Amino acid sequence: MAQKPSTKKKKVPYSNKPESLSVDEWQMALRQQFAETQKFKIKNLGDHPVFSDFEVYNPISNKHYKVAIRNKDAGLNYCSCPDFKVNELGTCKHVEFVLQKLQKNTRLRKYWKEGIVRSYSSMSLKYGKERQVFLRIGSNHTDKIQEIASAYFNPEGFLKPEAIFFIEGFFEQVKNLDPHFKVYPDAMDFIIDQRDQEKRQTKISALLPDGADSQYFDDLISAKLYPYQKEGIIFAAKTGRAVLADDMGLGKTIQAIASAELLAKEFGISQVLVICPTSLKYQWKSEIERFTDRSIMMIEGGLDKRKQQYQSDDFYKIASYGVALNDLDYLNQMAPDLVILDEAQRIKNWKTKTAQNLKKLKSDFAFILTGTPLENRLEELHSLIEFVDPYKLGALFRFLDQHQIKDEVGKVVGYQNLNSISQTLSDVLIRRTRTETLEQLPERTSK
């Protein structure tokens, strides 16, 4: 008697990409596979049984995410989780879980066939190799809204770069036609961030017309700065979220302090959180006192004492990595304007609890100080950059696929296209060696 062929779906390996799949197909399959075994709880937040917003609750991590289902295929759906925002797949385990639950329900099949056309228009953020603001035009006043949109959006529906600075005109005109017009929060946050960065860079360029030779640096801090340090300060302040990766001994600390002072003087920041190894806490205090007249609070002692310290008005607060790991919620309640991570090797291993928690710290500005941005593995560099800009290098799996060379069993045997990484990071990472800056440095003094 002939045996029936097995209908059991073959599992996709987690650690090694099958030759039959592209890296994107492999990663999508992994998320679909992972979703099949989850015990998430879902709640429909909208007015449609399928094409709606859902809340997805993970009882293990006790986290809630918002999932928007707009289509049964990847690309148009949305999730608020970090993975969705960087993986460039258009899906994640939460989206796949909701899709699987909805598609298994036979009573909902007619809705998939019918589809849905929303009457209202909306503006959202599309996540991919580039984040772009996207306009979806609904069935209300379609022709009129299309006519208005032509001055702000390209034919594909994406916001023109220059329109970021006068988008309010579009909002006003469309709201008059369609009071239910929606602007999703992440799209508005993206526009505000782009504006702020452009304004900051324009203002700093005007303040420092001669670059490192500008007189502005004479009174910035109580120290004489070398030209390369001034260039580092300009870079950090303009970028806002940067990696200072100069060789040891070239003054990354003084550059970070001077950058903080510039941001305070010109952009009104009032709280700076320095996170460093315990052994460097009082060295940081000494350097800040030496170069500035700012108040400093050392975060230490028991939890009750630390809670009070976080509420102080001191400009600089200095904490160890261990304390920061335990006090993440209090740090975010403090809402620092600028976070400085010194000796940032602590977050190079992205799997550690320290790395994962510190990347949840929220601040408008962030500086990473490290003399060794890349020591052994590309994962380390990716983890560092993820703190200042989670979108810069994209998803880790795609980054490694582009730059690692593996043998037939999946072992890393070499690297490729490393020059392209330097080009990609040129606007967030600055690194100078002692050899490059030798002519600017004084003679060595032994003590």
Image: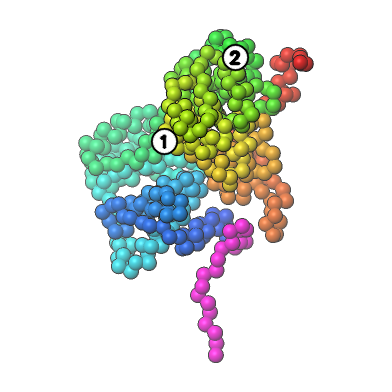
Spot occupied by residue 373 in the image (x, y as percentages of width and height): 65, 35
Q: Amino acid at mark 2?
A: Arg
Q: Is residue 277 above or below residue 60?
A: above
Q: Which residues are magenta?
A: 1-20
What's the residue at 46%, 48% (across, down)?
A: 84
Spot occupied by residue 295 in the image (x, y as percentages of width and height): 50, 17
Q: Quadrant of the N terminus?
A: bottom right
Question: Tag 1, which secondary structure?
Answer: helix
Q: Earlier in the sequence, mark 1 or mark 2?
A: 1
Query: Of circles 1 and 2, which is in front?
Result: 2
**Which one is nearer the viewer's eye here, 412 or 65?**
65
Is residue 232 visible from the viewing direction of this image? no
Name the chief secondary structure element in magenta.
loop
- Residue placed furthest toward the bottom: 1
Type of colouring:
rainbow
What's the residue at 41%, 57% (across, down)?
A: 40
Q: In the figure, is residue 103 to the left or right of 248? A: left
Q: Answer whether residue 4 is magenta in the image.
A: yes
Q: Answer whether residue 339 is magenta in the image.
A: no
Spatial CA span between label 1 and label 2 = 38 Å
Q: Quadrant of residue 425?
A: top right
Q: How many marks?
A: 2
Q: Which residue is mark 2?
A: 290
Q: Which residue is mark 1?
A: 190
